Image (cartoon, grey):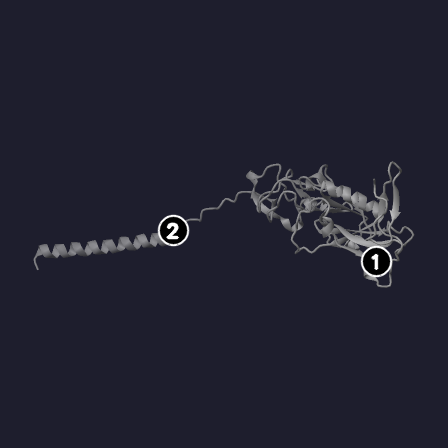
Amino acid sequence: MNSRALLFFLFALLLAGGTTYAARSWLASQQARPAPAAAKIVEQPSVRILVAANDLATGGFVRAQDLKWQSWPDDQVTAQYVRKPDATAAEASQDPLQALVGGVVRQRIAAGEPVTSGRVIKPGDRGFLAAVLTQGKRAVAVPVTATSGVAGFVFPGDRVDLILSHAVKDPNNPSAPAELVTETVLTDIRVLAVDQATADQENKPILAKTMTFEVTPKQVEVIGVMSGLGTLSLSLRSLEEEQRDVSGLNRVASVSHTIDSQVSPLITHHRSKSEGPHVTVLRGGGAPRNVSTATPGATASGAAQ
């Protein structure tokens, strides 16, 4: 082997060794270097505010399950939002969520949307009952008892029928005893309040003394007459029944009624057989005179000339 080849071989050997040494040194330095620290996540401060758990319609009552607390960015919270107080503040004052239960929604609130103080009117606030009423309706209070009020199982938001029980005299036989009659006069009436409560927060029966109903202006007059005629009572309607808007007084043909003799066959109402239809007889220029005919088919003599 000549000297040139030997020098070339030695140079290649040195180059390979240097490359290997440099590679090993670089790998060792990379392994010894500490791993870069993970970027620190900066959490934006947040607070818990009151939001709607369900869609709340205008004029509807607010229930506890309709509201919930939810975290919200602190820089996006306005003064109108309802914040959740800390533990010490909650013990010292009323829970803001419970304070809104039984309130009425002034403007529709979508699920997840913050509940602001101006969109819910609380019980006892001025204009509360007016906010509950549907447009064109009126509120009227009716005294009830434990029996007439369905033993306290009627709550705000329920719908009832109004029943009148009274005595009816036979105009053709004033001496006969009066018939006892019960009739359903108004149907599908919405209950607004029981006494002064507009929501049942404890879900317990309430033996109320007064109930407030949502009715039409005509129905206000009807209830006023019913109160003077006899005794009023309520009949609770099923929640599964289709709700319908009954305007004014029901038609006579659709009113359900029951007479005492239909309940007990022992009750009979004796009517005078001698009495029949009354006919007014007019005689030439004289004063009119009422004549009772014995049979419905009889005709009065002496027709008007």
Instruction: List x then y, in percent, for residue 22.
Output: 27, 52
Instruction: List x then y, in percent, for residue 24.
Output: 29, 55
Residue beneath the point at 34% across and 54% down: 28
The N terminus, quarter of image: bottom left
Q: Is residue 286 left or right of residue 21?
A: right
Q: Give the quarter of the image for residue 146.
A: bottom right
Q: Nearer the viewer, residue 32 or 210?
A: 210
The C terminus, quarter of image: top right
Q: Determine crowd level at label 1: few under 14, some 14-19, many 20+ residues with C-alpha closer than 10 A.
A: some
Mark seen at residue 33: 2
Q: Is residue 4 visible?
A: yes
Residue at mark 1 to residue at mark 2: CA–CA distance: 102 Å
First in sequence: mark 1 vs mark 2: 2
Instruction: List x then y, in percent, for residue 162.
Output: 76, 50
Q: Is residue 31 left or right of residue 269?
A: left
Q: Is residue 237 left or right of residue 281?
A: left
The residue that mark 1 highlights is 260
SS under mark 2: loop
Q: Nearer the viewer, residue 164 or 272?
A: 272
Residue beneath the point at 31% across and 52% down: 26
- Above or below: residue 11 compared with residue 142: below
Amino acid at dot 1: Asp
Marks 1 and 2: which is nearer the front? 1
Q: Residue furthest right?
A: 175
Amino acid at dot 2: Arg
